[in-house]
Amino acid sequence: MIHFIPIPWTLLLSAFGIAFVIVLVATPRVISLAKKYHLFDLPSARRIHISPIPRVGGIALFLGFIVTLFAVFGFDPRIFGVALCGTLIFLLGLLDDIYNLNPVLKFTGQIFVAALAIFFGITIGNITNPFGGIILLSPLLDIILTIIWMLLMINTVNFLDGLDGLATGVTAIAAGVLAILSLFSIVDQPSTATLAAILCGSCLGFLYFNWHPAKIFMGDSGSHLLGFLLATISIISGGKIATAVLALGLPVLDMLWSVIRRIKEGKSPFVADKLHLHHLLLSAGLSQPTVVLVFYGLTIGFGVVALLSGTWMKLFGLLVLIIALTGIIRLALYFRLQQRQKG
């Protein structure tokens, strides 16, 4: 049976509300800024939108995150590493939004920020043993797995940001799942729940402007920040990585499938295309809002499973997710072919 710690509602709601309002107020100003300096995501063969859209929404997300972080926690040394690394990963993404950085340079920057987070003590440390107990990681393996995890989360959100409201909403749901888990008595991490509430509030404030038809995109500045925060929140205390993997299983597996597919085709894994799962569902005839809501539903469903199950059930859930993803991709490809034949 699940037991919760006494829930700090005032703290959680304040953190959520402050972040939500800041992003809600800041986003129209960021839109005006983007228009003034011509910071647009232009239509292209690998884009869905047909008109220029402001692409630096990550600025509003960052303001919501960083201002709320210090408003709630003050200058607590425990959050300095999160604040510094979050700022650096945001700036890396913003530079890419403005100057279109070389993919290798961007990837190197991601590794640097992940390594810096480790310097501040943000490491996995141990993993749950399905047969009981925990497995302590050696220092070297801990560093390697932590960097891999952070890169995985950053690039999963980045790859997911292909439809209006998709990455924003999925991140908000995942943050909500992590917040709930942090309040379990076995975890007992109210500060981590507060961080997740800040992330959730920021995303929902931005979603108002990012829902279809989007008035602004988060850009790499936003996707990098959200991915880093998900990675960080999920490893601050034990047990959250498995939950995050299952809650975000669909986009994570889609990202890995896309990378493997591109490598097999002799292409760079960093080169964007329109063969992600959400693109396939879109080309199969579903509308943008419908595809996004499908992702929301699956994220909520597997998030609930992750909260209510142990390690073995999480592994079983991941297996089910892999099978489901394979089936969905095959169906999407079939209906996509049918749509093309009709056209």
Image (tube, rainbow, N blue to C red):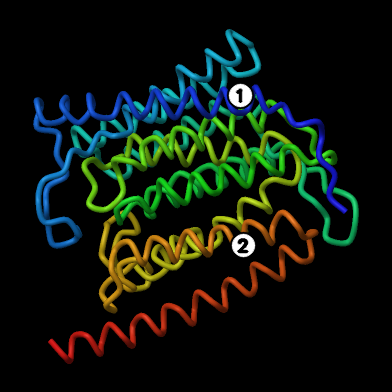
Whole-percent x and y of residue 322?
A: 57, 73
Q: Which residue is mark 1?
A: 119
- Quick check: can you spot residue 138? no
Could you tell me which residue is drawn at 56 percent across and 61 percent down?
A: 249
Q: Which residue is mark 2?
A: 302
Task: Say what secondary structure mark 1 lies in.
Answer: helix
Taking depth in this image into account, of 60 and 132 the one nearest to the observer is 60
Give the crowd class for mark 2: few <14, some 14-19, many >=20 residues within 10 Å: many
Could you tell me which residue is drawn at 68 percent across and 42 percent down?
A: 180
Whole-percent x and y of residue 303?
A: 62, 56
Whole-percent x and y of residue 262?
A: 34, 67
* Residue 209, image quadrant: top left
- The CA span between labels 1 and 2 is 32 Å
Q: Amino acid at mark 2?
A: Phe
Tell me which numbered mark, 1 or 2, is placed earlier along the sequence. Answer: 1
* Residue 24, image quadrant: top left
Residue 251, placed above or below residue 231: below
